[in-house]
Amino acid sequence: MLNLFLIQALNGVQLGILLFLVAAGLTLIFGVMDLINLAHGALYMIGAYLAATFTAATGSFGLGLLLALPATLLFGLALEFLVVRHLYGRDHLDQVLATFGLILILNEGVRIVWGAAPMSVPVPDALSGSVRLVGTLHYPLYRVAIIAAGLATALGLHLLVNHTRLGMRLRAGASNGPMVAALGIDIRRLFLVVFGLGAMLAGFAGAMVAPILSVDPGMGDSVLILTFVVIVIGGVGSVRGAFVAGLLVGLADQLGRTFGPILLRSVMDASAASQTGRTLAPMLIYILMAAILFFRPSGLFPARGSR
């Protein structure tokens, strides 16, 4: 039982790290630009497809990842220039409708370019083994690499936002965009940088998950829902909140799916416990969100004190 708990806890941390990578970009976009971007999950999908394509072309996942990141960045910048910048200052409903349309366009575009069949990316040879945790318990090395890469990215993002001139401008833009523009800072360029950074973070998450999940059209839709849950729990606009909430959601999802049916067996028969557990497991993260918002309506780390 302890081994099962450790494995599922690590799986939860890995899922939480991936959710943070997607949520961090989206919460920056909303916090600085006041933009609701439903198409952010599609950027996660684009990153996965670009990683699969470049990996197949070069024969190396490392090279594929290095090429996919700037390619996703350029794609995000082009998307901002062609579509998103026309939504600044518009009503949130307009933003929701326009970016939902982008989801449909990008999903269909992926089907046209890559086809509807799922793509697969092999786990790189250097990370194909496993590491021993305790006793005879082993955990896939690639999943450990995902956790390590996510933590390194979180640290880098923390340093960028809190200890650089660009981060100072991001925080100022989030607090009072018109004042930042009045002080002579090109707010449009700042928005372009923020959107490009968010796109690259989402693409990085998609590229990292490509070797362990199938790459298929619409793969960003499901992760987008969890990403919004993470943002709401952590506090809208808070990067620190996105990190903590991502871990909470990941752990609740993985541990709940595994141990929910086991715990229910103490109060009902095995078959009923299994069925009830499978039904309740997807609801746990929303129950968690409701419980946290009941006590902290602004989320765990309101943005005004944590960005």
Image (cartoon, rainbow, N blue to C red):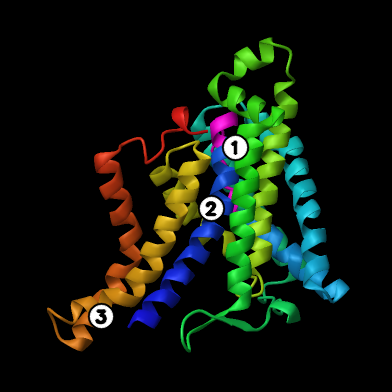
SS assignment at label 3: helix
What segment carries the magenta color? Answer: 30-41
Q: Residue lying furthest top in this view? A: 182
Q: Residues within 10 Å of mark 3 (few under 14, many from 20)?
A: some
Counting residues from the start of the chain, the first of labels 3 and 2 encountered is 2
Question: Residue placed at 44% from the left, 62% from the top?
Answer: 250
Spatial separation of the CA atoms under disc 1 and disc 2: 14 Å
> Which is in the foreground here, disc 1 or disc 3?
3
Can you tell which mark lies on residue 85?
A: none
Residue type, mark 3 in image: Ile
Q: Disc 3 to disc 2, how far (Cα)? A: 29 Å
Determine which of the numbered discs, if any, sits on residue 262 in the image: 3
Mark seen at residue 29: 1
Q: Position of residue 1 (x, y in %)?
A: 32, 83
Residue under the image location 52 percent in, 56 percent down: 19
Disc 1 marks a residue whose amino acid type is Ile
Distance (Cα) linking label 1 and label 3: 40 Å
- Disc on the earlier residue, 1 or 3: 1
User: Residue 16, can we see it?
Assistant: yes
Q: Secondary structure at mark 1?
A: helix
Quarter of the rendering containing residue 30: top right
Dot 1 or dot 2: first in sequence order is: 2
Q: Secondary structure at mark 2?
A: helix
Q: Residues within 10 Å of mark 1 (few under 14, many from 20)?
A: many
Q: Position of residue 178 (x, y in %)?
A: 61, 15
Q: Is residue 64 magenta?
A: no
Q: Which residue is mark 2?
A: 20
Q: Quadrant of residue 165?
A: top right
Drawn side of residue 3 relative to residue 223, left or right: left
Which residue is more in the foreground, 33 or 237? 237
Closer to us: mark 1 or mark 2?
2
